[in-house]
Image (cartoon, rainbow, N blue to C red):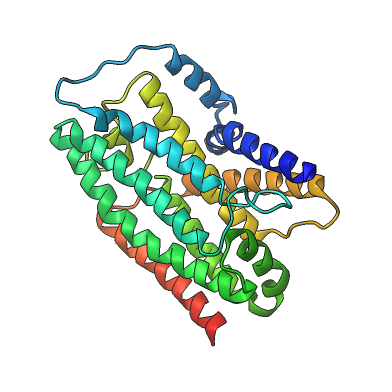
């Protein structure tokens, strides 16, 4: 009982404190590829502390929805993180079918972010919200097909069971199918976290902005919540990929946590490599890549169902 409580507290602390580290690793990797020193790995922590001390300027056209967008983004991402197992123990929230709640928590955060953009009354931010709600639903089938494949292989309908069982019982028998799911989930991760080739978190070009255009009116602590929520979402989706790809050591909790940390760092480096060697896609090409991810995940599901 005590060991479970300690693991739950550790899970919560890692989920709350580690996510801002991942964008720092991504940016440092991109800087190395560009031959620059780049910002420190802990830069986002400094930015969040600075933004927390600033004031908030609100438009007279905004309502409570404008405040709810950043708050919902953080809360839904953290709740989704409580459904994903990180160490050797089950996730703090675990029940059959919890992967449905996981997907719709992310969808709820996306809805409030788009609603907050529309609440400003800006046609520019409305354009970004329209793009967001048009592209994101194309990523959900790839996520669900992957859940179905992992559930079939592991025999579990809970994220804590299917992310562990798919490795222990499925990689030798259905490795090809799970590789297709992993590839699809990596594409979904890039799309859901607004990374290249879908979006560029550093861009300010009107014709290419998707997520960034929705948060242009947020400043101070609200912008800090947006940045923190984005990092938590990156961490949670990354944990989904890492836990499916890597085994859980049986030697105790410490090796499992070390392996998970190494996997998350490798994933962040991989994202940095992708953003360094690829250009952003034209908007008309984004649905094609998302549909490709859906087909990969669906093919993996068909292979394990046969």
Question: Residue lying farthest front?
Answer: 1
In this rendering, is residue 176 above or below 224? below
Q: Identify which residue is drawn at 55% across, 43% down.
A: 235
Residue 91 in the figure: left or right of residue 146 = right
Question: In terms of image quadrants, where is residue 15?
Answer: top right
**Furthest residue in direction right, as rendered:** 251
Query: Taking 133 as reference, is 215 above or below it?
Result: above
Q: Nearer the viewer, residue 212 or 63?
A: 63
Left or right of residue 248: residue 290: left
Residue 102, position in %: x, y? 47, 54
Q: Residue at x 86, y 54 (%)?
A: 251
**Residue at coordinates 28% horizontally, 48% vertically from top-left?**
132
Name of the residue lying farthest toward the bottom: 306
**Residue 26 seen in render:** yes
Residue 304 percent coordinates (x, y): 56, 80
Residue under the image location 46 percent in, 70 percent down: 145
Q: How many marks?
A: 0
Quadrant (top left, top right, bottom left, bottom right) of the C terminus? bottom right
Of the pair 285 and 255, the residue shown nearer to us:
255
x, y percent for residue 111: 30, 46
Q: Position of residue 176 (x, y in %)?
A: 60, 75
Horizontal side, residue 237 vs residue 115: left or right:
right
Residue 198 seen from this side: no
């Amino acid at each position: 009982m005590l060991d479970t409580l300690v693991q739950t507290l550790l899970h919560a602390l890692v989920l709350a404190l580690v996510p801002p580290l991942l964008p720092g690793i991504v940016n440092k990797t991109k800087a190395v590829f560009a031959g620059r020193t780049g910002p420190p790995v802990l830069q986002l922590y400094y930015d969040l502390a600075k933004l927390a001390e600033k004031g908030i300027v609100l438009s007279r056209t905004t309502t409570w929805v404008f405040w709810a967008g950043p708050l919902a983004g953080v809360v839904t991402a953290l709740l989704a993180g409580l459904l994903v197992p990180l160490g050797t123990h089950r996730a703090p929230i675990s029940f059959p079918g919890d992967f449905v709640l996981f997907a719709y928590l992310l969808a709820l955060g996306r809805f409030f972010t788009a609603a907050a953009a529309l609440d400003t009354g800006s046609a520019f931010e409305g354009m970004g919200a329209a793009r967001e709600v048009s592209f994101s639903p194309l990523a959900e089938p790839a996520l669900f097909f992957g859940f179905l494949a992992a559930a079939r292989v592991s025999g579990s309908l809970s994220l804590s069971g299917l992310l562990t069982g798919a490795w222990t019982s499925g990689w030798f028998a259905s490795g090809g199918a799970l590789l297709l799911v992993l590839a699809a989930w990596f594409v979904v991760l890039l799309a859901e976290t607004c990374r290249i080739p879908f979006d560029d978190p550093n861009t300010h070009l009107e014709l290419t902005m998707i997520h960034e255009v929705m948060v242009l009116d947020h400043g101070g602590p609200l912008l800090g919540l947006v940045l923190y929520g984005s990092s938590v979402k990156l961490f949670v989706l990354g944990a989904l990929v890492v836990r499916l790809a890597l085994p859980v050591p049986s030697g105790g909790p410490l090796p499992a946590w070390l392996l998970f940390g190494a996997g998350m760092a490798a994933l962040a480096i991989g994202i940095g490599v992708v953003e360094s060697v690829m250009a952003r896609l034209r908007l008309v090409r984004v649905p094609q890549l998302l549909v490709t991810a859906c087909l990969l995940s669906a093919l993996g599901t068909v292979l394990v169902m046969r």
